Image: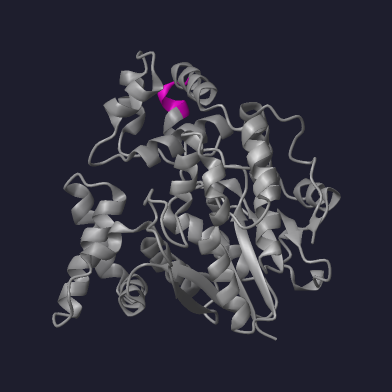
Amino acid sequence: MKNCAVITEYNPFHTGHKYQLDTLTAQGFDNIFCVMSGQFVQSAMPAFCDKALRAECAVLSGASAVIELPVIYATASAQLFAEGGLKIISGIKNITHLAMGAVGNSDEIQRIADIKISHNVKFTSALKAELERGKSYNAASAAALTRIYSNLYPDKPTVAQLFEDPNNILCIEYISAIDKYCANIQPLIIKRQGALYNDISTDGDYVSATAIRAADECGSLPAMQKYMPFNFNKICDERHRHAANIDLYKKMTLFALKRANVDDINRLRNCSEGLEFLLKKVSHLNSLDEIVSAVIGKRYSKKRIYRLFLDLHLNIEKGMTDKPFCTRLLACKSNFDFSLLPNCVKTTNAQIKTAAKLDHNMQQILQIDINAVNLYNTLCDIIGNYFNYSVIKV
């Protein structure tokens, strides 16, 4: 038996995602496991639609099972996003491959990942030097890896452009996380089809999830139907009745920031380099957009600031990604073999509650997921909580 896994968001599920799952099905894997973000995604914003709808789309497209990625990883940096997924995947029985979509050259991606793995001391030193120049972590990491790559492979073209696409960056982190948590897994890079990550064009057989979300903002979601192969009417109905109220989220965040003191901010996962003082300095402003504009720059990206805001709402502190966790199976095929699941993945609410009750650290991480669902439901005007869920079987 050989099983494959994918770490994903499906925000929302589209034909490009279907292409990837179709490709894996054609390669003859016995099972395809998707580890998917829940109600908040890597941008630290509410998901386009409920996790149940997105998980069902994946199973309808060929996935055997969809497992929820806890929010402390789902809303984290590329490195932690990848590591959270691998912590789950490493426990899947007979897991042989991790599939990933990339725009860049697969050989170049593999070489860069190997630098992080085999030349870690050299990379860490180069990264520190770039950070001291005032660059953000992502920019510093890209610059350090590009320089080391050029020194190791002087006959190869520069790889600087690879770091312009988030999918390539994730592939590098996936391969690094494989080495750390499950070295027997083989990376399987599948060339991304059609539009790039942030491309908002709506031509051809494939568009990006960004383009679909942009179309929805303009009231043109019906025009995206051909790119959304499953649950289209359900998703449209949910967007009509339960789209997240972003203006409300900004007001809630503004209040939370004004209420917090420097120590409250400093303990958060995404706070470092004196960011707490900068945020408090501008917290007198009465618009969250003004605050973000005043803070972002070479060192701090908009995405990082929004992740810190979510940390503040959900009480995500430094070091929490070192703690054990349990999570839930979101959806699966009707004939799925549950014995393949890792120990950390539970199939009922009772199992989740029991596991968390026995471990205080696990309870802390579960409480963050509970808080995330409560926040999402508040923003989307949905009644219910984290435990109003049962596995979807297709």
Say which residue appears at 43% left-offset and 58% top-offset. Answer: 79
Is residue 296 shown above or below 336? above
Left or right position of 132 against 327:
left
Q: Nearer the viewer, residue 4 or 128?
A: 4
Q: Nearer the viewer, residue 163 or 91?
A: 163
Q: Horizontal and vertical percent for residue 342?
A: 71, 67
Say which residue appears at 54% left-offset and 73% top-offset. Answer: 98
Residue 261 painted magenta: yes
Q: Horizontal and vertical percent for residue 173?
A: 42, 64
Q: Horizontal and vertical percent for residue 5?
A: 60, 70
The main secondary structure of the magenta stretch is helix
Say which residue appears at 44% left-offset and 17% top-offset. Answer: 258
Q: Horizontal and vertical percent for residue 101?
A: 46, 68
Magenta stretch in the rendered image: 260-264
Name the colouring of the figure: one colour
Is residue 67 shown above or below 21? above
Q: Quadrant of the C terminus?
A: bottom right
Dividing the picture into quarters, in which one does residue 92 lie? bottom right
Q: Nearer the viewer, residue 297 or 274?
A: 297
Res. 269 visible in picture: no
Res. 385 visible in picture: yes
Dividing the picture into quarters, in which one does residue 234 lie? top right
Q: Quadrant of the N terminus?
A: bottom right
Left or right position of 169 against 60:
left
Residue 319 painted magenta: no
Left or right position of 137 against 234:
left
- How many marks can you see? 0
Say which residue appears at 55% left-offset and 82% top-offset. Answer: 184
